Amino acid sequence: MALPQRKTDIGPPHYKQFLPPVIQKNYGDWKYHEVLTPGSMVHVAESGDKLWTVRMASPRILSTDTIREICALAEKYCDGYLRFTSRNNVEFLVSDEKKVAPLMKELKDQKRTVGGIGPMISNVVHTQGWVHCHSACTDASGLVKSMMDELHDYFTTKELPNKVRLAVACCVNMCGAVHCSDIAIVAVHTKMPEINHDNFKNMCEMPTVIGACPTRAISPDPAKKSVKINPDKCMYCGNCFTVCPPISIKNPERDGVAIVVGGKVSSLRSNPKFSKLVIPYISNEPPRWPKVVAAVKHIVDVYAKNAKKHERVGEWIERIGWERFFSLTGIDFTFQSIDDFTFMRDTMRTASTFKW
Amino acid sequence: MKKYNTPLLDDLEKGPWPSFVTEMKKAGKKNEMANDAVGHLEKCYSTKKGYWKHGGIVGVLGYGGGVIGRYSELGEEFPGVAHFHTVRLNQPSGWFYTSKVLREICDIWDKYGSGLTNVHGSTGDLVLLGCRTEALEPLFAEYSSRGWDLGGSGSDMRTPSCCVGPGRCEWANYNTLEACYQITQEFQDELHRPMFAYKSKIKFAGCACDCVASAARADFSVIGTWKGDIKIDQKEVKNYANKMDINAEIVDMCPTKCMSYNGKELKINNSECNRCMHCITRMTKALRPSGERGVTICMGSKAPIVVGSLLSWVIVPFMKMEPPYTEFKAFVRKCWEWWDDNAKPRERIGEVIEAKGMRSFLEAIGVPPQPQQIREPRKDPFIFYTDEDIARFKAKEAEEKKTGKYKF
Amino acid sequence: MDINELKDKIYAFVEAAKGKKKLKEKDIIKGVSAEQGLTPEEVKKAMREMIDVGKLMYSYGGGASSVEIPSEEYLREKGLIK
């Protein structure tokens, strides 16, 4: 069969054709919304019209058949209208109140995971990992699945003081907002890369490789027509590997993950914040990463017990102080948590007014 | 179809959270490529190592973005993943779909690719995972003829994305969905043909809640805001008082302490409000913004590579944001031009601003210095003065001598 | 300058850098417009026409995009050579 004529530079289709009639009618005229259950909410327009949303978790990797199953549900209960959230959840957009309960029931019967609205743990923003990325030093999807199996009550039923945004990055490139999440996992290398000098001269531009190093650890190695790396300066970021494939940094025995906490992106109450390093290293233990899961669960539990209502993890920690965070959680404080990259002068304490 | 023994991945099919392994196997039942992807991943799990090579040189004719080449080192062992390229489809604003178009997307993908997807990827595109090089042109012909174009990748403007906005949110201060659509259309050339030193991202958030995390990961974080008062419905305040402690949960948590509640009436000193959204999000029936709407444009945020992560900095405290978005488009062009003139390879605009100095950037784009841009003024005394700066200070002093009045 | 002549100049410019430096679009536009005394717009237009027909192609490597002379493999895949 002949292929249709390709078109270029058409951009995405206009969103308006995908909006259910109730949204088209009340576009920009929403008055308020109410969270009905952790998996459903209703938006009420100035006109009095209502739109119900039912939110369902997704593993982000979806087969086309599962997408078709989701479509079938949307067709049965919402005239085919649905959307996805920025955290990869599915949202069924229901215009008829009578269809909300049957939809929820069918989702339950199909063993779908419904929830994530309100002060809960929503879906986890994550990267490709071993599933599909060349620079991954762990598998993001496996970590997410393992963590959320453990924490899924916080998606479906259990409330927390505020939202807890989790994220997983499979290397320090941190695709997604991992560096500003309440609790995030970032996979790290811990050993200096090795260089295949024979391939270097064909595949890499020397100035680019030298310039790629944030700590100036890389210098020319004229004898080999390649570069050398200063072991005292390398902090294994892997940026040289990104610009030069013959520099290899993968190391199954040494690659692992670190846990950072206290970030946020919204400006509610306090400014957006970066996540900060609290657990510097846990070995990769596929398929379930039990120690990582336990650590995240533990931090969530301590937060749930100690934070005031509406405080995000970072706001709670700023109120009690980082020294108290480490004592409450019992996490060992290590050299790795003291910044020796670019931010030391902004992160050291300059007063004697700390807590014991 | 080859049958792989996958004990490690099988374990990830257990438990209550939806399983990505189940999805991969489901696609693998019908598709050799997806089936090999399962075997390939099991190998990664057993050796704790990834086997994908660096991205390769693949794409559709005329475009430099939208396809990411992906090849496995283990192509002989797992032929289905020897080529396993990613195709990014530009999502509709706000990720709204009808089942009809999603089915169509799936049907085309099943015909040419692995049947695996990410709905969606981190940047916002609908990601199709795994196809061979020779499938790219037919795939693109099928999608583009039905109204779907590719997203960005490489050193181009990446696919813009936005929050749900006025589609379903009472807090949206501007039309994020339309802004995202029109800006994506305006910059099609920049999206498809990598012309920059590195990637450039634009994200549209309707309010300070920032549901697209624009503040953390966009060169242009376009965040909705307003200039008028917060309107208070005291009757609704009373209703909230029945279910919450307004003083503890709202008044005491206000960052500017511009609110008070005496058990009967909620008061806001609007001139001191910094529009953080806490009270509005917790009492949405009682409180809502009013008056002039627009955006604050913050710039420069990015992940840690190379010299540490950045959050976006306030550059333009307020800009009107209405179709046809002429001012915003001109602003983006000016910023890109300066970035392009000054960036070294793989430098994001935030890094170039840091290297060249905020003054250099602000002057180039014609934005004056304003206290809204900073958290605090500089604390070191290592100050640049141009001859013109000093001449201006001197002229001001001469004027003061004439009038007998100091103007600081 | 005749557009075909300009295209030859652009091709020669890209060819000269082959194996030495990855050229961004901007490098080609700046370099050729300076070399030939043309406006950047003219060079950009000609370069784009070349990319559209596979005379040049976008490439990606080392974390950034560049413009290169297409490989035979690419041309064959695009049906531009047999």
Image: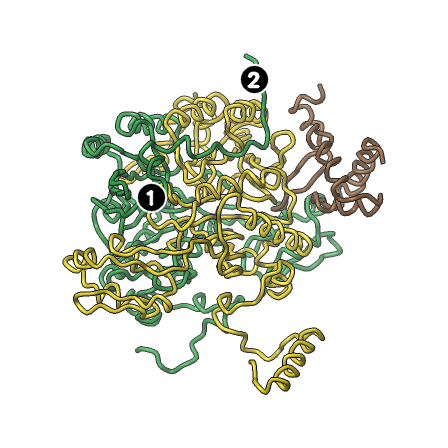
User: Residue at coordinates 19% horizontally, 31% vertically from top-left?
Assistant: A98
| Chain assigned brown | C
> Would you say B220 lies left or right of A146 here?
right
Q: Position of residue A108 (x, y in %)?
A: 21, 34
Q: Nearer the viewer, residue C79 or B37?
A: C79
Please give the residue where the numbered disc 1 appears in the rendered image: A29
Asked whether the beta carbons under mark 2 and mark 1 sit within 8 Å of each other, the answer is no
User: Residue at coordinates 58% horizontally, 20% vertically from top-left?
Assistant: A5
Q: Residue furthest top?
A: A1
Tell me the colour scheme of the image. by chain
Looking at the image, residue A280 lies above or below residue B134? below
Task: Name the colour assigned to chain A in the rendering.
Answer: green
Q: Label 1 lies in what chain?
A: A
Task: Pick the quarter of the image with the N terminus of chain A.
Answer: top right
Task: Between label 2 and label 1, give the one nearer the viewer.
Answer: 1
Label 2: how many Cα within 10 Å (few below 14, some 14–19, many 20+): few
